[in-house]
């Protein structure tokens, strides 16, 4: 399966926020790796996907209590 890069503008803005969202993102099969650029004003979440969909990631971020918009 090919790897896709998914990017999102989020409200994840600090280390504690990243810690809070980690178990939700880690529970999705098909995510190879992910990171949040908290230095970017748009708090960009970048996901290396090997099967996870935009909807999977958006749902996980929302369940963690944050907002995300696909870019």
Image (cartoon, rainbow, N blue to C red):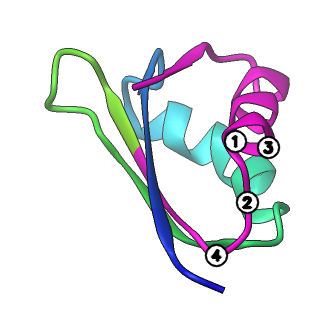
Name the foreground residue: 15 vs 40. Answer: 40
Q: Label 2, on which residue?
A: 52
State the separation of the CA atoms marked 4 and 3: 12 Å
* Mark in front: 2 vs 1: 2
Left or right: where does residue 21 sit relative to residue 45? right
**Mark 3 crowd level (few <14, some 14–19, many ≥20, 10 Å Cα):** some
* Mark in front: 4 vs 1: 4
Write the start and end of the magenta stretch as one range: 46-71
**Mark 1 crowd level (few <14, some 14–19, many ≥20, 10 Å Cα):** many
- The local secondary structure at tag 4 comes to loop
**CB of mark 2 within 8 Å of CB of mark 3?**
yes
Between discs 2 and 1, the one toward the N terminus: 2
Q: Label 4, on which residue?
A: 50
Name the foreground residue: 47 vs 13. Answer: 47
Q: Which quadrant does the C terminus fall into?
A: top left
Name the foreground residue: 64 vs 15. Answer: 64
State the separation of the CA atoms marked 4 and 2: 6 Å
State the separation of the CA atoms marked 2 and 1: 7 Å
Q: Residue placed at 66% from the left, 40% from the top?
A: 54
- The local secondary structure at tag 1 comes to helix
**CB of mark 2 within 8 Å of CB of mark 1?**
yes
Q: Label 3, on which residue?
A: 56
**CB of mark 4 within 8 Å of CB of mark 2?**
yes
Left or right: where does residue 14 sit relative to residue 16? left
Count the labels in the image: 4
Q: Label 1, on which residue?
A: 57
Q: Residue placed at 73% from the left, 69% from the top?
A: 51
- The local secondary structure at tag 2 comes to loop
Q: Position of residue 44 (x, y in %)?
A: 32, 33
């Amino acid at each position: 399966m090919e790897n896709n890069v998914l990017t999102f503008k989020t409200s994840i803005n600090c280390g504690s926020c990243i810690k809070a969202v980690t178990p939700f993102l880690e529970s999705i099969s098909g995510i190879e790796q992910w990171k949040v650029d908290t230095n970017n004003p748009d708090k960009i979440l970048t996901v290396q996907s090997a099967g996870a969909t935009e909807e999977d990631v958006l749902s996980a971020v929302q369940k963690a209590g944050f907002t995300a918009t696909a870019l």
